[in-house]
Image (cartoon, rainbow, N blue to C red):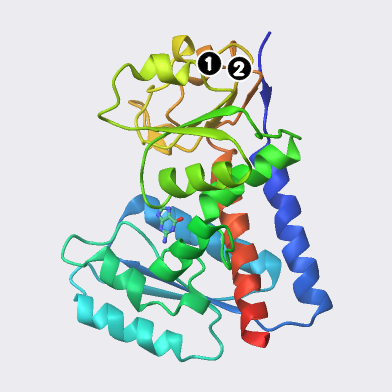
């Protein structure tokens, strides 16, 4: 029997409506600054989608498109300005950055109270401790999807493929906070298929077309695909070989229309949180 699809579009629409309603009711004036450096095609699409979501929610969006050759000092100087701008509640610097700019320096420059990506080490520390101000957008989006489908991960075996700072690591922590038994796999993992085949919930966040095949998936598992790739025909696809895995899994996220829209919805929620922090 084919798996049921988890509809990220519908769930994210609900999150955005909640944010929009709270902003309207509180008559809140909120701003998000998005900085993009260089000309990465995928980043442009993300940034445009963020802008649209801001419009829907009633959040002012300020976009800064900087040329590829922008120096680290110039970028930090813009971040400093935005840190001190009362109209800006959240600051997001789109990744990937050009190679000459150090991501850690950028993460540390953003005021922790405006850090809607939750990349600042202070916020990462909060995530480790479980007392977060901001939730990392993509992992938080995945948790919200599981919640929407009434999946309780307590005591379940959850396997995360990928150990990035943006997704893999915080994803494992959020699952752990919900009492899952968590395993993180990566490029050096031996016998990947044996590990993933144990998973009640399998999250793939690698960025490799066709990585997760049906033989790697436990029958009835929940499969969450965070991958955002292009196949050989240029079509958007995830890490999961969708057509075969959907015959094994009980629930599966599509790409597009799965995790992607959730990331943006959770970002909107974080911008609202930033406003509330300012009001405290
Ligand atoms: N690039 C891909 N995903 C993200 C994200 O969640 N935040 C930022 N800043 N850049 C990204």
Residue 86 visible in the picture: yes
Q: Decide if residue 263 is on the left or right side of residue 65.
A: right
Question: Where is ligand 1, by quadrant?
Answer: bottom left
Q: Decide if residue 19 is on the left or right side of residue 71.
A: right
What is the x, y in percent for residue 180?
A: 59, 35
What is the x, y in percent for residue 258?
A: 59, 38
The reply to whether dot 2 and dot 1 touch (C-beta < 8 Å) is: yes
Q: Secondary structure at mark 1?
A: helix
Query: Which image quadrant: the C terminus?
Result: bottom right
Label 2, on which residue? 249
239 over 78 or under it: above or below: above
Residue 148: numbered disc? none
Q: Residue at x 67, y 46 (%)?
A: 144
Q: On the image, which quarter does residue 152 sit in?
A: top right
Label 1, on which residue? 245
Neighbour class for label 2 at 10 Å: few (<14), some, many (≥20)?
A: many
Pick the front one: 277 or 153 = 153
Q: CA distance from mark 2 to mark 1?
A: 6 Å
């Amino acid at each position: 029997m084919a798996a049921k699809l988890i509809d990220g579009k519908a769930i994210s629409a609900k999150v955005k409506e909640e944010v929009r309603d709270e902003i309207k009711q509180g008559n809140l004036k909120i701003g998000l600054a998005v900085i993009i450096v260089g000309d990465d095609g995928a980043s442009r699409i993300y940034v445009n989608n963020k802008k649209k979501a801001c419009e829907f929610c009633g959040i002012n969006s300020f976009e800064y498109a900087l040329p590829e050759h922008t120096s680290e000092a110039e970028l930090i100087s813009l971040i400093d300005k935005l840190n001190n701008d009362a109209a800006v509640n959240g600051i997001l610097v789109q990744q990937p950055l050009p190679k000459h700019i150090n991501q850690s320096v950028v993460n540390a420059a953003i005021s922790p109270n405006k850090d809607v990506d939750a990349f600042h080490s202070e916020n990462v520390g909060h995530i480790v401790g479980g007392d977060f101000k901001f939730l990392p957008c993509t992992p938080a989006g995945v948790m919200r999807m599981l919640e929407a489908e009434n999946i309780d991960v307590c005591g379940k075996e959850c396997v995360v493929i990928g150990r990035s700072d943006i997704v893999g690591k915080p994803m494992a922590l959020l699952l752990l906070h919900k009492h899952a038994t968590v395993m993180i796999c990566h490029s050096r993992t031996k016998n990947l298929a044996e590990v993933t085949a144990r998973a009640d919930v399998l999250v793939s966040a690698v960025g490799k077309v066709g990585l997760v095949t049906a033989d790697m998936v436990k029958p009835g598992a929940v499969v969450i695909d965070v991958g955002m790739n292009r196949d050989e025909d240029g079509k958007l696809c995830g890490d999961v070989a969708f057509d075969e895995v959907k015959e094994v899994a009980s629930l599966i996220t599509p790409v597009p229309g799965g995790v992607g829209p959730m990331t943006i919805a959770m970002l909107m929620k974080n911008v609202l949180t930033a406003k509330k922090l300012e009001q405290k």
